[in-house]
Each structure stands twice: as C-alpha cells, then as structure tokens.
Amino acid sequence: MMKNNLTTLNVSRLHHAEFGQLIVRFFEDFSKAGLNATTDADFKTMFDALQDQIPTFNSAQNQVQASEESKDIAKLDEVRDDALQNLRNALKPYRKTNDTEEAGAYQALSLLISEYKDAEDDSLEAETNKLNTLADRLESADYTGHVTELGIGKFVSRLKNANTEFNELFSQRSYKTSQKDAVNVKLLRKNMAADYDQMINYVAALAAVKSGNYYKDILTVINNGRTYFADTVLARRKPGNPPANPVA
C-alpha cells in the first residue's frame, strides 16, 4: 500500500502571520486543484469551520500589529513564554536520575509546573497572574530547597523577571479600545490550530486506507504549504539567522 504521510512541520514555531498564511494557502491551493469539499460531508464540516475563522484571526492579528507598543508587548510576551519553556526544559536532565534527593526534587517541581502547562495560551493578564503565582510558589519555603537541589534558580529568576518586565509595559499601555475588544490572538490561534490538526489528520488517515485519489490529492495540497513553511522554519535556525519564534 502506498504510504501517505503528512509533511513534518512544527506549526508552533511559525509567526502568527505565517500561521495565518499556512491556512490561507491551503484554501487557495485546494481551490486551484479543482477539488470539491462536498465529496465528504465530514471533511466539508471541518473545511468550513476552519475557513470561517480566517477573517476573525486576521482582524485580531491586525489589532496586535497596530502599534509599536503592541509589538513591544508581543515581544515581551514571547520572552516570558520562552522563559517558562526553558524552566520546563531545565528539569528534563533529572527525569531518570538515580539520586534520591534529585528524584524527589524533580517530582515535586514537575508536579508544580504541570499545573501551569497551558499558561501561554491564556489571555495576557491571566498569564501574568499565573506566572506570578508560579514564581512565588517556586520561591516559597515549600520549593526553594528543590530548586536549589537541581540548580535551576537562574531559570526561576529569568521567568520572574520576564513576567515583571512584561507586566510593567502592559500595565502602562493606553488602550484605544477596551481589552475585551482586543481579541486574544493566542487563543484564536490555539483554537484554529486544533481545528487544522483535526482536519489534516483526518485526511492523512483516509489517504492511507482509501482507494482512489481524492484524499491523496487533498493531502498533496496540505503538504505543499507545510513543505514551504517547514523550509521557512529551518532557514531561521541556520547560523546568522534570527531564532524562530511564534510571534510576528
């Protein structure tokens, strides 16, 4: 049986604008391929649901990019997101430690940090509050010993400082519209990415087991865009190029 696989792409490494273009390109390429979404009612439902989100996502993205102040806020939000991920990564070397003290510290800190696994996807203010709480708990008597044991204090400090720096700028921001009207781009993207993943995995699964070319042709359309943006992400990782980040 012919193998039909999705092209590997770390979608989370795309800037917001690139992610939006990945979705738009799929619909453009699908139209040019002369395919008919109504051939499969379930696929059509997912197809329409994803397409309907594009205008709202683009509008929200435009709001974020409307001013230099907003860009600065987005950049600092990216910095604190990275600081949180670096803190998580700092625990990884201790996952299989044979040292009893290290193992105990790893387990305690892993359980604590897991409580904040979706913090990056919250609204900006909600994320600020969660990271404040996490930093305070890490610096409390319950956890300072564990932090010291694993030698990750600098990652805790970086997270706290990044969150403080973000909040200082964010709290000074003068809104021309209310925060309620400033749509949460990160949450929109999270929902849109989930719908995109559902659709492409559905297509890939059927392309592998169904006879005929319908799902294989859709998979080819999907992979066209994924290949382009996979190359984009790879190019940013080469020496001399800026590091990849999910905020544009």
Image: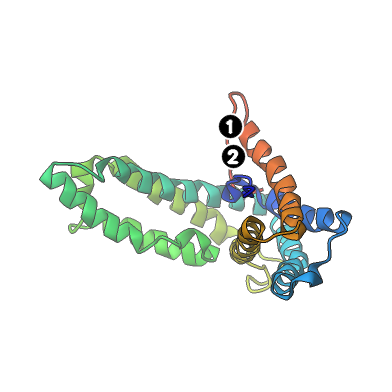
Task: Classify mark 1: helix, strand or loop.
Answer: loop
Q: Are marks 2 and 1 in contact (CB under 8 Å)?
A: yes
Q: Looking at the picture, how far across and down is residue 34, in whole percent?
A: 88, 58
- How many marks are shown on the rendered structure? 2
The residue labelled by disc 1 is: 237
Type of amino acid under label 2: Ala
Please tell me which residue lies in front, 209 or 73. 209
Residue count near mark 1 (Cα–Cα under 10 Å), binned few <14, some 14–19, many ≥20: few
From the viewer's perspective, tell me whether residue 17 is left or right of residue 102: right
Residue drawn where x is 74% and y is 49% of the image: 220
Q: Is residue 68 above or below residue 115?
A: above
The residue labelled by disc 2 is: 244
Residue drawn where x is 41% and y is 60% of the image: 117
Q: Looking at the picture, how far across and down is residue 52, in whole percent?
A: 76, 70
Please tell me which residue lies in front, 199 or 230. 199
Task: Classify mark 2: helix, strand or loop.
Answer: loop
Q: Is residue 44 above or below residue 246?
A: below
Residue 210: image quadrant is bottom right
